[in-house]
């Protein structure tokens, strides 16, 4: 027998038995209630009738005289006739003894002749103890008056109903209680017959109901459901096909709808399996191609890290962790000539194969332009124009490009909207934040600013993509720049390889298992020493170095970077702004006025020298017309703005910002020297 059949049959049996039992109980109490209410009404009328046969004022006298009184005898006869004619069981009148009614004195006590063999009536004046329940009933009646009705289905004498009525004298005082009781033989008989009939015929009716209802349920519901279950169970073992049994279900209800739905599901699954096999095959092919592409991309990134036979004074290591099979980040490093090391870091917009292909093109173009001896800023401009020419997909790439002269430690670099690298100068890690240009391939003809700094022994450079600082944990928080600086601060004693591994581990630990949203690419470089430092002794730190540039405004950033490379790396932002403003004031004046009367063009030589650990001098030499800016007095700030003469404010600030400013004319050249001591 199917499980569902067993469950349905069991449910029918339980439901039938429960309904039968509930019906018996309900009918029993309904009949009992109807009969009890009939008896209650009947006995109430008898109680009032019996009370009308005598006056309450005479109860005590009747209790004392009893049968000696003719009036008592007449009243007793009336009550006896009332008892016999109405077929009640007992009628008695008592005087409860107040205040607790523990004793009662009988005045009248009439017993139906049918019960004389079991009960004998008490004579007038008979005093008897009262049970607790009766005492409580008598007390309520004597105190409040009125009437009480109580019934019992299971007393010693069988079912009975009793009505108790308080009696009053002529003044309204409650003087006694009349009680009328009747044995409910009719109730008992009716209930017994009802239970007998229910127990005899109900099981037969229930059995017939079970057979008919069970057969209906089995045919209408169970068999179709069992058929559907077997077909669904055998679907997998029959090569994903159903038999024709589902088509034979025609019940015109939800079960037929279910059968048709399962048939359609089978057809849909067959189509899905075919599509899945096709998609799986295609996915395996794509996965294999992506694996090959990932291998090719990985192979294009340089893996030959330090130590290098020809360059013992550097450490270099890099890694790329793509977010997908292939990524859009890239790094590169290579040499041109003997001592020029190029460092490249880029991040292509987008992910996957298109970004990887764009990365390959950008990387190849940058390396090719570098071999042609272009400067970093010029390389960015040329590569940008080439990428813009064939960029139908609208991709772009952020890029940081630097060239380090390993013989001097001088680094030239340009930034195309990439994250600023982190520089370690022996004291602390800080971001190398110089003016940045627009990303490559975004706008043709874009210009890029070139910067220069002086690296010294122990200087470190950490280059990275935004996949590091924008790495997220499960709460959506970013790794950020502060955590990056904090992680790098712990790597002072680590090698370049160990630094890369440590930062990657810190990012992974921060993510805490969250999905990697972007490629993570980092490069760590350390200059342990350069050729010029090898040839210098400790007293050669004061040797002057010079930079010659055209007297044009566009060369101002190069001049500022050159001068700043001689200043300590840990100077405050305020000190940095002061020396930048002083250099800008002197250089811009030379470019605008020195050669104005001599054809408008000429060179400026900037000579920088360390005068101590935290003191430098910066001298500007030009061959322009003779001009001493210090000869003019300082502006008089006591005058009003309308009367004060214009000019002189820039050189005034320069003198305020510097320790000293001096001028001399030597060999046909103007020489203006600035000296600054840093805190």
Image (spheres, rainbow, N blue to C red):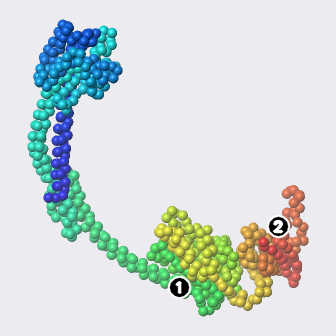
Disc 1 versus disc 2: nearer the observer: 1
Report the front residue among 385 and 189: 189
Q: Quadrant of residue 554?
A: bottom right
Residue assigned mark 1: 303
Residue at x 73%, y 90% (from the top left corner): 535
Residue 22 visible in the snapshot: yes
Q: Residue furthest top?
A: 70
Secondary structure under the numbered disc 2 in the rendered image: helix
**Residue 190: image location, x then y, percent:** 13, 31
Residue at x 19%, y 27% (from the top left corner): 160
Q: Quadrant of residue 152?
A: top left
- Position of 138 with respect to 295 (left or right) is left
- Position of 590 with respect to 569 (left or right) is right
Q: Are marks 1 and 2 in contact (CB under 8 Å)?
A: no
Residue 53 visible in the snapshot: no
Residue at x 59%, y 88% (from the top left corner): 307
* Vertical order, 53 against 119 (above or below): above
**On-image quarter of the C terminus:** bottom right
* Vertical order, 167 against 22 (above or below): above
**Residue 464: image location, x then y, percent:** 58, 75
């Amino acid at each position: 027998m199917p499980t569902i059949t067993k469950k349905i049959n069991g449910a029918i049996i339980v439901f039938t038995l429960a309904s039968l039992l509930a019906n018996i109980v309900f009918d029993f109490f309904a009949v009992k209630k109807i009969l009890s209410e009939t008896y209650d009404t009947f006995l109430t009328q008898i109680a009032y009738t019996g009370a009308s046969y005598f006056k309450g004022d005479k109860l005590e006298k009747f209790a004392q005289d009893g049968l000696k009184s003719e009036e008592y005898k007449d009243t007793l006869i009336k009550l006896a006739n009332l008892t016999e004619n109405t077929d009640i069981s007992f009628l008695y009148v008592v005087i409860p003894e107040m205040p607790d009614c523990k004793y009662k004195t009988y005045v009248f006590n009439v017993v139906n002749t049918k019960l004389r063999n079991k009960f004998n009536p008490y004579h007038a004046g008979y005093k008897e103890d009262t049970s607790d329940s009766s005492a409580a009933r008598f007390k309520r009646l004597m105190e409040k008056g009125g009437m009480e009705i109580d019934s019992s289905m299971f007393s010693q004498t069988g079912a009975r109903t009793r009505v108790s009525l308080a009696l009053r004298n002529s003044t309204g005082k409650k003087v006694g209680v009349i009680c009328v009781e009747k044995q409910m033989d009719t109730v008992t008989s009716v209930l017994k017959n009802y239970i007998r009939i229910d127990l005899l015929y109900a099981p037969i009716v229930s059995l017939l109901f079970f057979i008919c209802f069970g057969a209906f349920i089995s045919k209408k519901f169970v068999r179709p459901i069992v058929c559907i279950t077997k077909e669904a169970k055998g679907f997998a073992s029959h090569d994903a096909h159903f038999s024709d049994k589902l088509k034979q279900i025609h019940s015109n209800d939800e079960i037929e709808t279910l059968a048709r739905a399962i048939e359609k599901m089978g057809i849909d699954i067959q189509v899905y399996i075919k599509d899945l096999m096709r998609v799986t095959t295609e996915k395996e092919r794509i996965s294999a191609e992506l694996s090959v592409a990932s291998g090719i991309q990985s192979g294009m990134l340089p893996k030959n890290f330090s130590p290098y036979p020809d360059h013992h004074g550097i450490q270099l290591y890099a890694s790329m962790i793509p977010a997908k099979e292939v990524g859009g980040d890239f790094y590169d490093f290579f040499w041109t000539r003997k001592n020029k090391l190029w460092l490249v870091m880029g991040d292509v917009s987008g992910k996957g194969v298109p970004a990887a292909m764009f990365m390959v093109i950008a990387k190849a173009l940058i390396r090719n332009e570098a071999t042609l001896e272009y400067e970093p800023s010029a390389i960015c401009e040329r590569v940008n124009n080439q990428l813009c020419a064939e960029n139908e997909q609208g991709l772009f790439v952020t890029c940081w490009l630097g060239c380090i002269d390993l013989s001097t430690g001088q680094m030239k670099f340009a930034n195309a909207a990439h994250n600023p690298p982190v520089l370690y100068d022996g004291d602390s890690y800080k971001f190398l934040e110089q003016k940045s240009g627009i990303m490559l391939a975004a706008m043709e003809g874009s210009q890029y600013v070139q910067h220069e700094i002086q690296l010294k022994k122990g200087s470190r450079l950490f280059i990275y993509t935004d996949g590091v600082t924008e790495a997220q944990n499960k709460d959506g928080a970013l790794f950020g720049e502060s955590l990056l600086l904090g992680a790098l601060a712990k790597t002072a004693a680590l090698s370049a390889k160990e630094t890369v591994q440590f930062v990657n581990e810190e990012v992974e630990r921060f993510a805490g298992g969250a999905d990697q949203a972007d490629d993570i690419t980092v490069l760590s470089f350390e200059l342990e020493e350069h050729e010029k430092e090898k040839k210098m002794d400790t007293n050669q730190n004061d040797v002057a170095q010079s930079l010659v540039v055209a007297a044009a405004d566009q060369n101002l950033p190069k001049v500022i970077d050159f001068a700043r490379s001689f200043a300590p790396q840990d100077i405050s932002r305020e000190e940095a702004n002061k020396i930048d403003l002083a250099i800008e004031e002197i250089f811009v004046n030379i470019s605008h006025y020195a050669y104005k009367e001599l054809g408008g063009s000429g060179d400026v030589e900037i000579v920088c020298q360390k005068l101590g650990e935290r003191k430098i001098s910066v001298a500007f030499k030009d061959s322009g017309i003779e001009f001493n800016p210090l000869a003019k007095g300082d502006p008089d700030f006591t005058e009003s703005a309308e009367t004060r003469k214009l000019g002189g404010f820039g050189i005034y600030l320069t003198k305020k910002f510097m320790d000293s400013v001096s001028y001399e004319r030597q060999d046909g050249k103007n020489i203006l020297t600035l000296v600054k001591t840093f805190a």
